[in-house]
Image (cartoon, helix red, strand yellow):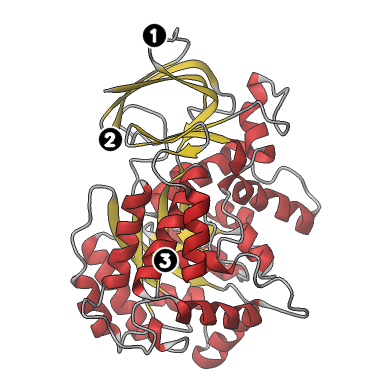
Amino acid sequence: MSVYWCELAWLGDAEPQESVLIECDRERIASVAARMAAPDGVRVLHGLTLPGFANAHSHSFQRALRGRTQRATEGSFWTWREQMYEQALACELDSFQALARATFAEMALAGITLVGEFHYVHNDRDGNPYGDPNALGEAVIAAAADAGIRVTLIDACYLHGGLPRFRDADVGAWVTRVSRLAPPSPRARLGAAIHSVRAVDPPSARRVAEFTRERGWPLHAHVSEQPAENESTIERYGRTPTEILHEAGALSPAFTAIHATHMAESDIALIGESGAFSCFCPTTERDLADGIGPARELVDAGARLALGSDSHAVIDMLQEARGVELDERLGTLVRGRHTPVELARAMTSGGYASLGWPEGGRIEPGALADLVSVSLESVRLAGTRVGDALDAVVFAATAADVRNVIVGGRELVRDGAHVSIDVAAELSAAISAA
C-alpha cells in the first residue's frame, strides 16, 4: 500500500479538491478522500495532482527529427515526409530501441504515464523481415518497460507506398505476423492500425478491422491529414477515407481517427455516430502545416477526444490540450469552444480509453494508480487561485512544471527527475546513434 497526500487534486469537476488523500493498492487506487489532514510520513504531492496523461499517438523514432526539419522554405507535409523517410532508414534494431526508451523517458518527465505507439517500422533497412518479424515491435514494448510507463503497441498494417521497411507482403502476412506478438506484460497491451487508406486497400482494411474486433483490440488510422489524401482517395475509390473505413467496418467505439483534419460534414457525422475517438496532435499539425481540424464539430456529433504528440516536435500534453482550443480560436474567432475540463479529460481518460485502458485516466477507487503532480510555484503559475488551478494548468503550465509522476502506485519521477534514467544524456546518445 502506498499513500499520497495531495495539496490539490482534480477529481473530474471544474474546481479541484483540497487536501486529498489517495491510497494505492499496487496498480489500483484503493481510496480517495478530500479535506483530510496529511498523516505523518506520507508522501506529499504539492501543486495540482491529476490522473496520468495519455499520449495516444506516438512515432518514437521521429524524436530524432526535432530541430532538423525547420529550414526548408515552401515546405509541406510531403517535403517533411522525405526527411522522415531518411530517418526511418537510419535506425538499426539496437538504436531503434534505445531511441524509444529515451523518448518514453522524456514522456515520463512530461507526466505521460501511457503511450500509444503507432508502430509501422517493421523490417530491416532493405525491407526484409528480421529473424523475429516482430523484433522492432517487441523492442518498443521493452523500451516502455525500461522507461517505466505503460504502452499500447498499435501495430500498423502498411501494404502500399512508403518504404519497404514499413510494408508487409499482404494483409494475410500482417495477420500472421501480428498473431505471433508475444503476450504483453501487465503494463503493455496490443492494438492495431490501418496506417491510412493510401497504404491499405479497402478489402485489406476490412480484414484488419475484423481481426481487431475478434480480439477486442483498439483500432487506429491516420484519417484525412492532408487535402491531397482526400483527393487521391476520392479519385481512386469515389469515396472519402472516412467513408472507406466505414464501409470496411472499421468505425466503432474502439476506433480512433488520427488527425481528422480535413473532414466533410458527412465524415464528421460517420465518426460521431460510431462513437469513435478523434485524436488531435496540434503541435505536429502546426509543425507540418496540416491545418486545423474540426474538433468541436466532431465532439458535438458524438465523437470523443484524445491527444497525441505524434512526431514529437514537442512532448508536452498540456500544450496539446490547449492547442485544440487555441487553434480553433484562430480559425473561428470564438473563445471557449472547449472547456478546461473537456481538454483535461482528452489528455487523461479520453486517451486511456482510446488506447484500450478504460480503467485509467481518473482519480477514483478502482482506477489505475497513475498520477501526475504539476507545480503551481513557477513563474508561469505563481499566484494561481485554488478554484482556477485546473484552468491555469491547462492553459499556462508546461511539461517543465511536472514535478512527480506515479505509475501503478510507485513514483517514477520525483521532484522533476526520473528515478533511474538520465533522460537528457540518453536522448543525446540515442539520437546520435540513430
Question: Dot 1 corresponds to which residue?
Answer: 39
The three-letter amino acid code for the residue at tag 2 is: Glu
- The disc at residue 27 is 2
Which sits earlier in the primary sequence, circle 3 or circle 1? 1
Task: Give the class, few, some or many, for how many residues have Cα within 10 Å of label 2's Cα (few <14, many ≥20).
Answer: some
Task: Look at the picture and state if 112 lies above or below 273.
Answer: above
- Answer above or below: position of 267 versus 157: above
> Residue at left 21%, top 80%?
131
Q: Residue at x 71, y 71 (%)?
A: 70
Residue at which label 3 appears: 118
Question: How many badges with numbers are in the image?
Answer: 3
- Residue 272 visible? The answer is no
- N-terminal-most mark, 3 or 2: 2
Secondary structure beneath label 3: strand
Measured along the vertical axis of the image, is residue 205 above or below residue 342? Answer: below
Q: Could you say where residue 257 lies in the image, as x and y percent from the top left?
A: 48, 64
Pick whichever, 159 or 353, lies toward us.
Answer: 159
Residue 340 percent across, percent down from the top left: 62, 38
Residue type marked 3: Phe
Mark nearer the viewer, 3 or 1: 1
**Residue plotted at (68% across, 40% down):** 395
> Which mark is drawn over residue 146?
none
Q: Where on the picture, by quarter, is residue 311?
A: bottom right
Disc 1 residue type?
Pro
Return the x and y of residue 115 as percentages of the image width and height.
42, 53
Q: Tell me whether circle 3 and circle 2 mark residues in contact (CB < 8 Å).
A: no
* Residues at marks 2 and 1 touching, judged by CB atoms closer than 8 Å: no
Q: Tag 1, which secondary structure?
A: loop
27 and 221: which one is in front? 27
Q: CA distance from mark 2 to mark 1?
A: 22 Å
- The reply, left or right, for residue 410 in relation to residue 182 is right
How far, Cα to Cα, is label 3 from label 2? 25 Å
